[in-house]
Image (spheres, helix red, strand yellow):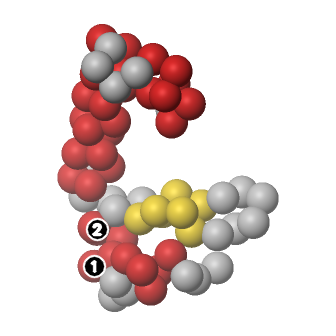
Amino acid sequence: MIALLRAAGDASPVAAAVRDANARLALLFEGLPEAVLVIDRVTSAILDANETALRRYGYGREELLKLR
C-alpha cells in the first residue's frame, strides 16, 4: 500500500480511499473481542497484535512483537 500511496500522491482520491480503508480495518482489528496475532508465515515473527491479545497474554505491544 505504501507504493500505491506514493504513486497516487497523498491528495488523490485513491490515496484518500486507501487511508479510509486502512482506518476502518484498524478499528475492526482493534475492536475484535478475540485475541488476534498477525504472524509472518515464513519467519514466525509476530507482526502485530490487537488490544485483546495484549491483555489476554499479558504483554505490552513492543514486548510481544519481539517474541517468536
Residue pointed to by mark 1: 55
Relative placement, left or right, of 40 versus 20 is right
User: Would residue 11 be seen by someone viewing this image from the given angle?
Assistant: yes
Q: Which of the 4 image quadrants contains residue 46?
A: bottom right
Viewer can see residue 28: no
36 in relation to 6, above or below: below
State the residue lying farthest toward the right: 42
Element type where label 1 sits in the image: helix
Type of amino acid under label 2: Thr
- Rendered view: 13 above or below 59: above
User: Residue 59, position in %: x, y?
Assistant: 37, 86
Tell me the SS state at disc 2.
helix
How far is disc 2 from disc 1 in space, using C-alphas?
Answer: 5 Å
Q: Residue at x 51, y 36 (%)?
A: 2
| Position of residue 39 in the picture relative to residue 12 (left or right) | right
The reply to whether discs 2 and 1 touch (Cβ–Cβ < 8 Å) is yes
Q: Which residue is mark 2?
A: 52
Tell me the residue at 25%/35% (across/down): 24
> Where, by quadrant of the figure, is residue 9 drawn?
top left
How packed mark 2 is, by other alpha carbons closer than 10 Å (few <14, some 14-19, many 20 or more), is some
Neighbour tally class for label 1: few under 14, some 14-19, many 20 plus, Cα within 10 Å:
few
Left or right for 16, reference 18: left
